[in-house]
Amino acid sequence: MKVLVACEESQRVCTAFREKGHEAYSCDIQECSGGHPEWHIRGDALEALKGGIILTDDWVMHNIGKWDMLIAHPPCTYLSNAGACRLFKKIDGVSWINADRFYKGLEAKEFFLKFLHADIPRIAVENPIPSKVFCLPQYTQIIQPYFFGDPYEKKTCLWLKGIPPLEETERIPPRFHWISAGSFKADGTRRDSVGVTHNQKLRSKTFPAVARAMAEQWG
């Protein structure tokens, strides 16, 4: 299959599909960190959706034709339910919406939906649990890294079209939260939950065991 992994610089999903013999390409506006520029399209993922002639980061052109599968990881900063504390403010007992953040969320939703409704027969779109205010379509399933052998908690939603839900491969007891996060208490101070990382780039990477499960079950 010809597989586009959109909004992925780590190349973890791309590499997992390559190891199964598929013609997979990652795509992101950033340079790839996975070590395979020959499999990476640096640029607009919405342009890459169109297929046809693509240019990889080793300056080689490829005639893709149409993609057989899309796996997309659109940015979640403004859509995630975890950011709800920044979307609403309370002043003198009245709740107000942060208009700038709200409109950025609407733009992120439009970007998300372009992947979900792409003209590709097999689609998986990944994001955290979304804020209800943006009314995203209902996700197909929620997965956790510890369903696949990694001892971490990090709820991830999958919206699927033309492919079945992922089946667990090796459920183990979770030992750590992957993401350090927190909420605001009534007095305005922050209540932090301890996790492995605060780093936004690191926390967005797909776990290797999850990537392998995608390649093995969807490939």
Image: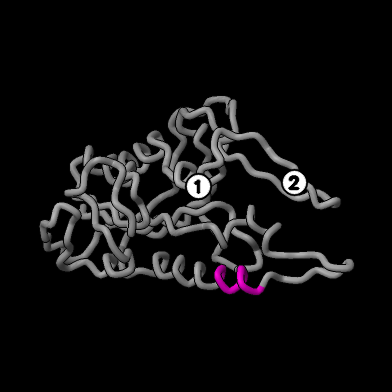
Quick check: 22 left or right of 138?
left
Q: Amino acid at mark 1?
A: Gln
Note whether 105 is above or below 71 in the view shown.
below
Quick check: 162 left or right of 37?
right
Can you tell which quarter of the image residue 180 is in? top right
Quick check: 30 left or right of 55?
right
> Can you give x and y, in whole percent of width and height, for residue 3 in the image?
26, 54
Q: CA distance from mark 1 to mark 2?
A: 18 Å
**Residue occupied by mark 2:** 190
Helix, strand or loop at mark 2: strand
**Residue occupied by mark 1:** 200
Q: Which residues are magenta?
A: 99-105
Note whether 211 is above or below 122 in the view shown.
above
Helix, strand or loop at mark 1: helix
- Is 153 magenta? The answer is no
Q: Give the mark nearer the N terminus: 1 vs 2.
A: 2
Counting every numbered tag in the picture gives 2
Decide which of 131, 142 is in the foreground and name it. 131
